[in-house]
Image: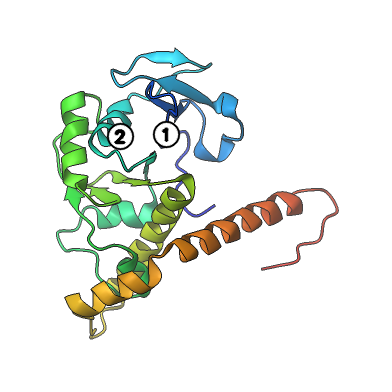
Amino acid sequence: MEGHGDMTLGHVSLRDPQQRGFWMKRNRVGLGEIGAPEDFVLVDFDGEKLSGDGGRHSEWPIHSEILRRRPDVFVVAHTHPVHASVLSAFDEPLLPYTLDADYFEALPRHRDEVALITTKDEGAALAASLGRHFAVLMANHGVTFCGTSIEHATCVGVFLERAARAHILGAAAGGKTSMPGPATRARRHAQIMTPAHIEHSWNYFCRKLEWTMATRAPGHACLFA
């Protein structure tokens, strides 16, 4: 609903609590079609499917190598949101046209010479570009983002596309701009990227999903716009 769907492309994973690898969205279906545990397959860190029906995405190394490098991360996602994907091709950094950009301390950009990340070395290179951050632009491709929880990762992904959209719209407007400096941006980040804001945003997205599903029912009147 927030711009990350792209046909059957894109994938998300959750670190397996039993340390066997990670549960990854099965392939051949879109993110918007995922609705049950049966839509995930268990994959080990060498790319072997251990459990579940359906196939695994070829870009499994994105997930395995970030989870290897980042013990603080429990969820990894790779998607192709339009505005962030366009921004990934720019040479300039994400600019704070709005507060959305300041959810991120920095937004690294990963450049490579492949269409897909299908080997451990390629996944490790992406993980190195991500570093200690929670999102990375994949040049001329899309984005990868992650989080310490499902709620955190979801908000990072949504905030990233909002920030990219503001950047693209602001740059296209062509007006004279004034941007806050590093110290101000650091203060803004500390004020807005808080556990409370993640919780409130997550709960809003859950309510929005419930409202959207309810309005699909025959004869139901839409109560919000």
Q: Residues within 10 Å of mark 2 (few under 14, many from 20)?
A: many
| 57 left or right, relative to 67 | right
| Quarter of the figure with residue 223 | bottom right
Q: How crowded is mark 1: few (under 14 residues within 10 Å), some or many (20 or more)?
A: many
Question: Disc 2 marks which amino acid?
Answer: Leu
Q: Residue at x 22, y 32 (%)?
A: 123
Please, is residue 211 above or below residue 15 in the view? Answer: below
| 144 left or right, relative to 15 | left
Q: Name the residue under label 1.
A: 13
In percent of width and height, residue 206 lies at 61, 53
In percent of width and height, residue 194 lies at 41, 65
Label of residue 202 in the image: none
Q: Name the residue under label 2.
A: 67
Q: Which residue is drawn at 43% across and 34% down?
A: 14
Q: In the current view of this chain or complex, which residue is farthest to the front?
A: 18
Q: How far apart are marks 2 and 1 (CA)?
A: 10 Å
Depth check: 44 or 158 in front? 44
Q: Reading the chain from its start, which is encountered first: label 2 or label 1?
A: 1
Depth check: 215 or 171 in front? 215
In percent of width and height, residue 156 lies at 39, 55
Residue 189 in view: yes
Q: Residue at x 47, y 45 (%)?
A: 150
Q: Determine contact: label 2, label 1, CB under 8 Å.
A: yes
Residue 169 in view: no
Label total for image: 2
Question: Disc 1 marks which amino acid?
Answer: Ser
Please, is residue 120 above or below residue 165 in the view? Answer: above
